[in-house]
Structures are given as structure tokens and as C-alpha cells.
Image (tube, rainbow, N blue to C red):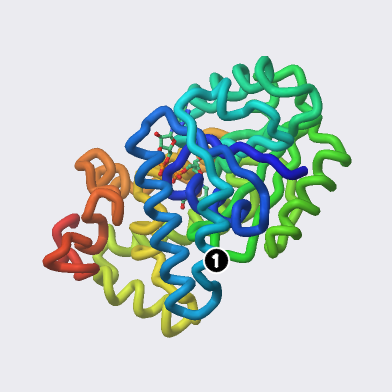
Amino acid sequence: MKHIAVIGAGTMGNGISHVFAQTGYSVNLIDISQNALDKGISTISKNLDRMIAKEKIDETVKSATLGKIATYTLLAEGIADTDLVIEAASENLEVKLKIFGELDGLCAKNTILATNTSSISITKIAAATQRPDKVIGMHFMNPVPIMQLVEIIRGYRTSDKTTQTIMKVSQKLGKTPTEVNDYPGFVANRILMPMINEAIETLYHGVAGVSEIDTIMKLGMAHPMGPLQLADYIGLDVCLSILNVMYDGLKNPKYAPCPLLVNMVNAGKLGVKSGEGFYDYSESKKAEKVSGRHL
Ligand SMILES: NC(=O)c1ccc[n+]([C@@H]2O[C@H](COP(=O)([O-])OP(=O)(O)OC[C@H]3O[C@@H](n4cnc5c(N)ncnc54)[C@H](O)[C@@H]3O)[C@@H](O)[C@H]2O)c1
């Protein structure tokens, strides 16, 4: 396996492209938006500069990595001759079903189709294809170049061969792949999202403020980042959508999203990407607490 395609050049797609290209794979990065592709390449370039500044790599690695990535706006052109396609487009079931239906018709028979979905059923996505044995979840963590884990999710019909191939590819990237089965939220988000939701409930009920909740979890539980700030980084819309998938899929009220989270998303406060969530990320107030405004 030498040639791969990544669909979606956003937060995750550019990180996934970065690690594959730095490992020596040729990467076709595909997005419907040219602007997203340009931004994606610029982010990879900046992240490589940061690694140079920390003396982890040199200029030759940077130019070799960027030289391995080609960009496309047309799916049919971007997936040509690839052995593995990793879909990292928006977290939307209809979008993913459409992409996988098209990929199945366009890709060679043996191409493995992976998805980086945070919560959508791999089995459901695989059912949009005629090759459910070759469809698998490859759930990278954000930021991809730094985080060690890849949660490998086997759909109901994913084959042993596909799973073993993807485990090996992930190891080649220097990651630690960990195999799980396909149930709502998989493992990472099934455990993480109720914690984030509970932190939001704690704020909603006025038990403590934003910085107090985050400080308690950082200093008391040795978490590198508090749950509210982590939610801002993940994206509050993403957190809400994952909680809804678990709530619907597991039929258990304990996964019901906190009304405060719903309100913030409806108000367009999505965290870092919108400039404000539990903290203010505007240039003037970098990561300051937004005091009590959501209560
Ligand atoms: N953000 C995270 O922390 C995180 C972590 C793990 C997994 N994920 C998952 O990774 C996936 C991508 O998330 P993200 O945060 O990078 O999203 P994002 O919004 O940053 O980027 C999504 C990109 O997909 C593109 N896109 C949408 N429809 C497309 C299509 N039909 N064809 C090609 N490109 C298309 C958009 O233009 C956009 O550039 C989602 O499934 C998400 O659940 C996200």
C-alpha cells in the first residue's frame, strides 16, 4: 500500500494527510472546496514549521512531505489508483452515505474504504457499498500528528483481512491502533462525551464556573485539559451530534445532551472554530473565560 486518498481537508483530513505523507505515502487530498484545500495545505505547512522549530525534523522532511500531497476537488480524479481511501468529510450521515456509494462505484475492487467518523455506524456506512468487508472505521484523534491513538472500528461485516491491514498501516504511521466493535460512540466517545456532558450539566446547574470545573479536572484528575476547554477544541456542534447519536442509538437517557449545550450550538457558539464557546478565542481575548453568560 503506497498511494492513498483522504476525503475532506478540514481539521482531521489535513492532519491525516500530514502523517501519511511524512511516513512516505503518496496522498491525494480531496475536498469539494478549493478554499478548504488551500487552508489544509497551509495548516500542514505551519505544523511542519513548528516541528522544524522544535528540531524534530529538518527542511528536507518538510519539502518531501509537502511534495507527497496532491490536491483535488473532483472525487473521481482524486481516488484514481489509490489502495486506501480515508473519508474525513463533515460528520453527517447523508454526506457519508453519498460519498461511500460513489467510492464503491469508482474505486478498484480491492481498495479499502475507511471512515474517520466520530460516531456514525460503520455498519450503516458499509451498507451503502457492495464491499462491506472492506469498510472500516479509522478514528484518528485531534491533533493527528501528535496523538498516539487510532481507534479501529470493525463494522458488522468488516473482514479480518481488512482489519489486519489497517492495524498494520496505523502501526507504520507510528500510531497505536486499538480494535473495537461498532456500537454508538465506539469506546473513545462513549466514555469521553458523558464526562463532557456532565461538566456542562455541572455548569448549567451553577455548581461551579467554567474555570473552576476545568481546574478541578486538570489538577485533581491530571487531565491535560479541562472538559469544557476540550469541548471547545472538539467543537460543540460535534459534541452535540455525538451525544445525539448515542442517545438515539443506545436509547438511554443518560446520553441526553445538556440543554445548555443545545442552546450554545443553536446560538452559533461552537468553540474554537467559531471564536467562542466556554472560552473566548477572539484575537483580543485569547482563551479567556466567558463569564457566566450562558446561565
Ligand atoms: N474535529 C475532531 O476533533 C474530530 C476528531 C475525530 C474524528 N472527527 C471526525 O472527522 C471527520 C471530519 O471532521 P473535521 O473536524 O475535520 O471536520 P471539518 O468541518 O473541519 O472538515 C470537513 C471537510 O469536509 C469537506 N467536505 C464536506 N463534504 C464533502 C464531500 N462530499 N466531499 C469532499 N469533502 C467534503 C468540507 O468542505 C470540510 O473541508 C468527521 O467525521 C468528524 O466526526 C473529528
Classify 10 Å Cα crowding around label 1: few (below 14), some (14-19), many (20 and above): few
Q: In this view, does 120 lie to the left or right of 258?
A: right
Of residues 145 and 201, the one nearer the viewer is 145
Q: In this view, does 75 lie above or below 246?
A: above
Visible in this render: residue 190?
yes
Visible in this render: residue 197?
no
Image quadrant containing the C terminus: bottom left
Q: Name the residue under label 1.
A: 60
Q: In this view, does 133 lie above or below 145?
A: above
Image quadrant containing the N terminus: top right
**Residue drawn at (60%, 18%) of the image:** 102
Q: What residue type is labelled 1?
A: Thr
x then y, percent, for residue 209: 24, 70
**Residue drawn at (61%, 37%) of the image:** 5
Asked where in the image residue 183 lies, by quadrant, the reply is top right
x then y, percent, for residue 256: 44, 44
Q: Is residue 56 left or right of residue 179?
A: left
**Residue drawn at (66%, 37%) of the image:** 114
In this view, the residue farthest toward the right is 161
Q: Is residue 101 left or right of residue 281?
A: right
**Residue drawn at (25%, 43%) of the image:** 263
Of residues 129 and 173, the one nearer the viewer is 173
Give the tally of numbered discs: 1
Of residues 7 and 224, the one nearer the viewer is 7
x then y, percent, for residue 13: 50, 45
Q: What element carries label 1?
A: helix
In this view, the residue farthest toward the left is 284
In this view, the residue farthest toward the bottom is 219
x then y, percent, for residue 284: 12, 66
